[in-house]
Image (cartoon, grey):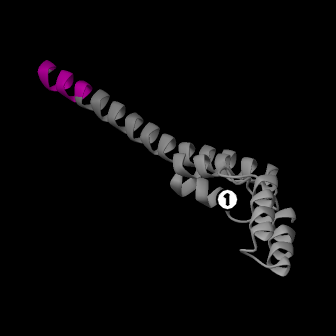
Amino acid sequence: MILLAAAESASSRSGLLLTLLIILGISVSIAVPVVFGIITMNIAVKKGYTGKWFLFGFFCTLVGLIVACVIHPNGEKPVKASMNSADAIKQYKELLDQGAITEEEYNKKKAELLD
């Protein structure tokens, strides 16, 4: 009888522990994506974007956060790493002077680069 009571008590404690671990696991599995979604959305909004950034952060967690961190601010063109506009205009001017391109082509490229 005493052994049966002790077994029932141990069984109820392990059942309670298992229930608590399940509740903790569910809570963490919901809380972490929500936090990533909120942070991702806030970063994107500060950069001028609107839309479903919360969902992107929620479902993609770390990937969504990284993307939000590396995107360029909305409306701002990324700077070309290979060559800046002044160098490109200089090269087109040299091509114009050599006769490789026409004045019209030079002016068109120059206008594109200065925009």
Amino acid residing under circle 1: Trp
* Residue 3, above or below 56: above
Q: Quadrant of the C terminus?
A: bottom right
Query: On screen, 67 above or below 22?
Result: below
Position of residue 57 measured from the top left corner of the image (x, y, whole percent): 60, 53
Work out whether residue 110 can be spotted: yes
What residue is shown at x 82% (from left), y 62% (from top)?
Answer: 75
Direction top: furthest residue: 2
SS of the residue at dot 1?
A: helix
Residue hosting label 1: 53
For residue 18: magenta? no
**Could you tell me which residue is drawn at 38 percent across and 35 percent down?**
21
Secondary structure that dominates the magenta span: helix
Q: Residue 95's x, y, as percent?
A: 74, 67
Image coordinates for residue 54, horizontal then vertical, percent? 66, 56
Residues in magenta? 2-10
